[in-house]
Amino acid sequence: MTAPTATKRQRKPVVLLRPVPGDSAIHRLWAGSKLLMVAGIGVLMTFYPGWVPIAAVAVLVLVAAWIARIPRGVLPSIPGWLWILIFFGGLTATFAGGSPIVDFGSVEIGLGGLLNFLRITALSIVLLGLGAMVSWTTNVAEIAPAVATLGRPLRILRIPVDEWSVALALALRAFPMLIEEFRVLYAARRLRPRNVAASRRGRLRGAWLELIDLLAAAITVALRRADEMGDAITARGGAGQISAFPSRPKMIDLWAWVIVILVCGMALALELTILGTSAVTT
């Protein structure tokens, strides 16, 4: 009787720039509205990174994920070294001290640095979730027309808005495709037999040559994909068709803006008045 072999749990990769299939209110929002909301919330969190705005934006992200029916499977696996890094970051931030101060017998520990570290960590997670929500609910083909529509006033200054939007759309389309190509390339490279050198200098030289081979293969794959994408764009009428698709906001965007402005406005008012004064007095 053979003992069962332990299988190593495979980590889930980061799923970005690939919309989750569905037809919800979040999916039907105009891509330009989503980009403007993310930019506005980013500006708000930059100037007022308090706990109340962070919590309000986190609630918005969670509610939007619930409405869009985002499955838990799209969330990536968190590696163990990241938890260790966060632990040591919080430990070193605790040494900065500051109020509030907690007494442990004869030892006083200031938790101000730790709270600031936790606030910055929560802010980073919320902003990453906000960007991921836009990625999971927006088709890449809708980005270029939305950017071209938003940048239309800049055409007065003779800024090539259409060309910039086309370049952005092609970069967003090519990014996940190249990631998959590089993963396959790296996996194929690992399957090749290796000649282990006896000396340390030989091992370093072998690692350097392997890196050069990987870079050369990656450049070749990227050029091949670019050539194929160029042929496909030419067959469909040129790059101008990418940004020429009609893209306009709808009535649902107006309601989304009202909800976002109300939530962010209430959070900012609480941060600057009631909760802000209480934090100062404590």
Image (cartoon, rainbow, N blue to C red):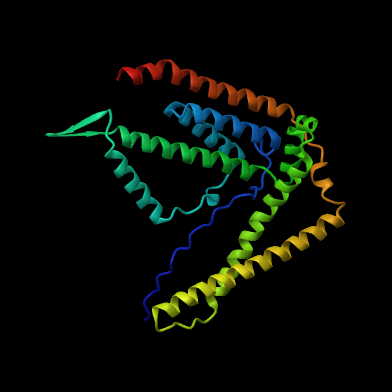
Write the residue at 49% across / 34% down: 58
The number of discs equals 0
Write the residue at 68% across / 32% down: 33
Which quadrant of the figure contains the N terminus?
Answer: bottom left
Quarter of the rendering containing residue 154: top right
Q: Is residue 212 above or below residue 58?
A: below
Q: Is residue 261 above or below residue 3?
A: above
Q: Is residue 244 above or below residue 51?
A: below
The reply, left or right, for residue 62 in relation to residue 226 is left
Residue farthest to the left, as pictured: 106
The reply, left or right, for residue 215 in relation to residue 159 is left
Which quadrant of the figure contains the C terminus?
Answer: top left
Q: Is residue 40 above or below residue 163?
A: above
User: Residue 157 in the image: x percent, y percent?
Assistant: 77, 31
User: Residue 149 in the image: x percent, y percent?
Assistant: 76, 34
The reply, left or right, for residue 182 in relation to residue 165 is left
Write the residue at 39% across / 55% down: 81
User: Residue 138 in the image: x percent, y percent?
Assistant: 67, 43
The reply, left or right, for residue 75 in relation to residue 177 is left
User: Residue 129 in the image: x percent, y percent?
Assistant: 53, 41
Quarter of the rendering containing residue 8: bottom left
Closer to the camera in the image, 241 or 95: 95
Closer to the camera in the image, 221 or 125: 221
